[in-house]
Structure formats: C-alpha cells, structure tokens
Image: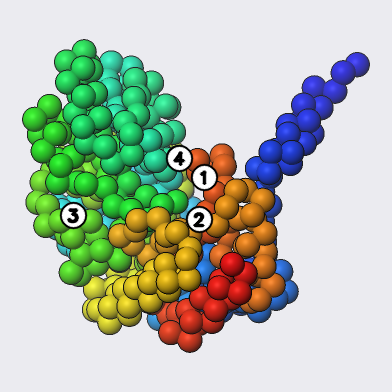
C-alpha cells in the first residue's frame, strides 16, 4: 500500500533544491544585543527587541509579581474564567498611549489580525491589501471569505484604480496595510490611504507591529508619526519593542465591544497569561517614560544605514529599525550571512518565498553600542 505521507519528504526535497529550506537556530542567554546562538557568542542583529526591553529586569519583576498573584496562566477564555485586572490595566494603558477610546488584548498579534478581519468582513465584502502585507493580514482576509485584491506595494494610484473599479460591487470594503513592512522596513503612506478610504467609505486596518515604540514623538507609532486623528483600526503586538508577548486592537469603544462578541480568535482562546500582560504593561510605561531609548535607537539606525551604503551595499529604503542589504542571489545571500556568523554577528538571510528577492536583514536595537555597529560594518566590508 502507498504511504499517504510520502509526499511530505518529496516536498522537502523540492525546498532543498530551490534553496528555500529553512531551520531554526537555538539562542541562549538573556535577550539583548549579545547572545549565545548554537553555542557561539554573537552580536544579535536578528531581534525585534527594538528598545532593548525584553531583557530589562523591571519587566521580569513585573511578570514574577503577576505570577505570584494570579498564577502562570489565565486558565480560560476571558469571557469565562480568564479575566484578570492586569488585562484591563494594559488595555487602558495602550488605548491612552494610542489616543483611542478602548483596546482589546489577544494572545498574539497574528490572532489579533485573524480575528479582527474575520469579524469585520465576509463573503459579501471586499478587502484591498498591499502586496507586501504580513501573512496574518492576508490570512485574515482569506479566512473571512471576502474577495481580496492586492495593489502594488505603496502604490496609491493602483489602490485608487482598484477602489474605482471594485468598491461599488461590495457591501463593505476594508483596506489593510502594515505601517512598517517587516521584510523591507519602509513606511506605508497612511495619509494618502486615509484620503482614499474616506472618499470610498472604507474601513482601514493598520498593523503597527514594527511601528509601536519606534515611530512618533512618544513612540505610539505611525499614526502619531503622521499626526493622523482619524478612525483607523490599529492592530499591534506586545512581542517586539514592548518586550513581552501578545497582540492588541485599538479603536473606538463600539469597535472593541463588537470584537469582544464577534472575534473568534478572542472568544475561543485562553486569555493572555498574567505574567506576559504585566511585563507588557511595564514595557508600555518604560517606552513612554524613557525617551532616550528611542533617540539612541535612531542614532544606531543612522550609523548602520550610512555605514552599509558607504561600503557599497545597496540598502532598501527604510523608515524603521529594519535595514535590508542586497548582496546577491539566494546562494550569495546565505553565504554572506554564514560568514557574518563566523565572525560573531547574527544577521539572517531572508529569501524566497518569504520575499521576492534575497537580502540580509539587520534589526537594530537601542542597546547596540557604536562599537558593535562599527565592528559589524568592518566584517561586512571584509566579506564584500
């Protein structure tokens, strides 16, 4: 009899031949600019810990205190047994920071996008997505049953043409974009998107995963950066600049009340653990009060960006802590990353099918020192 699982091994062989096969590397030690990866001490340029809060002892203390009070898990859906005071405290803190009426926590940013989009649109509706959107935004639209069309990356003329052609054929329309695109580092033109959304009566979802803590005068994200005070559904994560785990949706009180009753990935999921919520709450407090972290982050971004371009590496246009350098095809990019690793720097090769073209992705942190960045640039120059 034929093995019904034989195709799995064949598919993996295909991935190997195409250079698409991927595997994990074990990291050890306290999260920060230096870690032990596969037993080797390296300077970490692969982390989304933009403000360096993940290894801050104050977040650890907050988590420990929460565990001592409420235990290690929420024990159930928040509609049943999982509601804790720290959940609402964190939701109020995020809403206040973002300038919205209310907020709803999810167990991850991915679940926040899936649940929100599925709750807002269905088979009678239209979703328009930037072609470089994160997988969670794309998946949410697919699972909703709505018709999804993609427009060319950050191309407002293409979006306008789609709206003109398609909008009046559907009951509701939702425009979905990342604020910062995770594999390029560039920023969505939100003011132009909002003008089109208003003209064509569209809802807008913005994923602030890589903008929160990085953009804006107080670090609130891209809406603060653009000084936009318009009805946008803002989704984000607690696992990057805020140093914890989980996701959230910020918006008006009606939206949040609606999601409590309609977002399946919130209703049918155990609530965020008290330790994670408490750590994130402390992360929000520190991100707002210690503004020097963000200033140092942007100094580090400028040093690395200018240095890479000086040694002849083509850097993708970026408005964030994500800097991508193009060094060749899949094989050349993987080899470049491995040589960096040999010299004590962890900067991963990002390649198809995740992205259309291969690149080295450098994630900058506030806790990187000028010396670390200078040594990384020297290593890049030697490899080039």
Instruction: Report the residue at 22% width, 43% height from top.
Output: 233
Q: CA distance from mark 1 to mark 4?
A: 17 Å
Position of 259 compared to 181: left or right? left
Front residue of this view, candidates 110 and 20: 20
Query: Looking at the rendered structure, which numbered label has been put on residue 326?
Result: 2
The image shows residue 341, relative to residue 349, as above or below, that is below
Q: Earlier in the sequence, mark 3 or mark 4?
A: 4
> Which mark is on residue 135?
4
Q: Which residue is mark 1?
A: 357
- At horizontal 62% and vertical 62% (from top left) the residue drawn is 337
Helix, strand or loop at label 1? It is loop
Mark 1 / mark 4, whichever is N-terminal: 4
- Label 2's element? strand
Residue 54 percent across, percent down from the top left: 45, 72
Q: Quadrant of residue 241?
A: bottom left
Query: Residue 21 has which mark?
Result: none
Quarter of the figure that contains the N terminus: top right
* Label 4 crowd bin: few (<14), some (14–19), many (20+), radius 10 Å: few
Local secondary structure at mark 4: helix
Decide which of tag 4 and tag 2 comes sooner along the chain: 4
Q: CA distance from mark 2 to mark 3?
A: 30 Å
Viewer-nearest of discs 3 and 1:
1
């Amino acid at each position: 009899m034929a093995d019904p699982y034989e195709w799995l091994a064949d598919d993996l062989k295909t991935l190997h031949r195409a250079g698409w096969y991927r595997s994990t590397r074990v990291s050890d030690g306290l999260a920060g600019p230096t870690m032990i990866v596969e037993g080797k001490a390296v300077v970490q340029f692969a982390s989304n810990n933009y403000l360096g809060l993940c290894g801050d002892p104050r977040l650890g203390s907050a988590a420990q205190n929460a565990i001592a009070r409420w235990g290690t898990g929420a024990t159930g859906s928040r509609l049943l047994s999982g509601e804790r005071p720290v959940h609402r405290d964190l939701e109020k803190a995020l809403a206040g920071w973002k300038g919205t009426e209310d907020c709803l926590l999810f167990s991850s940013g991915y679940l926040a996008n899936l649940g929100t989009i599925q709750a807002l649109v269905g088979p009678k509706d239209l979703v328009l997505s930037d072609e470089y959107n994160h997988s969670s935004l794309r998946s949410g639209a697919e699972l909703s049953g709505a018709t999804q069309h993609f427009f060319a990356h950050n191309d407002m003329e293409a979006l306008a043409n789609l709206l003109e052609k398609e909008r009046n054929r559907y009951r509701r329309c939702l425009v979905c974009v990342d604020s910062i695109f995770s594999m390029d580092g560039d920023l969505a033109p939100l003011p132009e998107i909002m003008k089109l959304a208003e003209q064509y009566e569209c809802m807008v979802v913005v994923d602030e995963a890589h903008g929160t803590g990085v953009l804006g005068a107080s670090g609130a994200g891209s809406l603060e950066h653009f000084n936009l005070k318009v009805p946008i559904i803002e989704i984000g994560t607690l696992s990057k600049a805020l140093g914890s785990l989980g996701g959230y949706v910020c918006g008006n009180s009606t939206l949040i009340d609606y999601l409590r009753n309609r977002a399946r990935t919130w209703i049918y999921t155990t609530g965020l653990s008290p330790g994670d919520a408490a750590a994130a709450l402390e992360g929000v407090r520190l991100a707002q009060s210690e503004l020097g972290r963000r200033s140092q982050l942007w100094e580090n971004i400028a040093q690395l960006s200018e240095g890479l371009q000086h040694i002849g590496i083509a850097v993708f246009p970026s408005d964030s802590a994500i800097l991508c350098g193009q060094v060749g095809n899949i094989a050349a990019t993987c080899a470049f990353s491995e040589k960096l690793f040999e010299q004590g720097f962890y900067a991963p090769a990002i390649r198809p099918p995740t992205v259309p073209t291969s690149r080295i992705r450098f994630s900058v942190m506030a806790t990187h020192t000028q010396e670390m960045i200078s040594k990384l640039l020297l290593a890049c120059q030697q490899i080039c």
